[in-house]
Image (cartoon, rainbow, N blue to C red):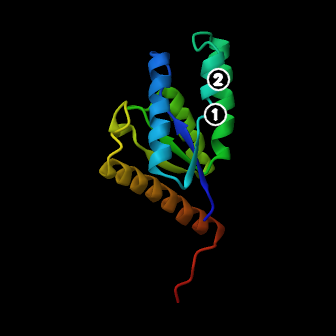
Amino acid sequence: MKLSTAYVAHPLSGDLVGNVTRVRMWLRFLLEAEPDVAFGCPWLPYVEVLDDGVPAHRARGLRDCLAFVPKFDGIVLVGGKISSGMRLELDVAETAGLWVADLTNWGRFPPGTGLAEVSRAVGMLADGRARWERNKAFATGATEDAS
């Protein structure tokens, strides 16, 4: 099985330190929940070295992150809401035909790592990837003929 890749999108503006802390928690949760997906936050080093309060820095970071999105197979939305930056990332992902797993309704923090939460996350990620595979096969005419 090919290892799937997923871009992790999370709100940043406002409480930058708190949001970076929470995305690290989400990343750990996702890594533990889904061993068959390689998750990436290519924007994380940008927020650590650029000043989000400087418009030119924010524009550069957003531009570069939007360039990263289509390099992935899917996008996972976390953090309790879809921010304006996440909306742009999602738009690029959908245009590129990536699978989408929206976990924002789970809240700002990842759930506990109990079996039920992990199973739920795996199911949502698998469902997003399965829809993506079906759409990709349909678009390329590579659907299986059951007859």
Instruction: Indicate the position of residue 39 as horizontal and vertical percent values.
Output: 57, 44
Disc 1 marks a residue whose amino acid type is Pro
Bin the neighbour count of mark 1 within 10 Å (Cα to Cα): few under 14, some 14-19, many 20 and up.
some
- Whole-angstrom CA distance, mark 2 to mark 1, is 8 Å
Q: Which residue is mark 1?
A: 42
Q: Assign a secondary structure to mark 1.
A: loop
Instruction: Indicate the position of residue 38 as horizontal and vertical percent values.
Output: 59, 48
Residue positioned 47% across, 24% down in the render: 21
Residue positioned 47% across, 27% down in the render: 11
Residue positioned 36% across, 54% down in the render: 119
Q: Closest to the observer: 43 or 95?
A: 43
**Quarter of the figure with the N terminus:** bottom right
Instruction: Indicate the position of residue 106 as horizontal and vertical percent values.
Output: 34, 39
Q: Which residue is mark 2?
A: 46
Disc 2 marks a residue whose amino acid type is Tyr
Q: Is residue 143 left or right of residue 27?
A: right
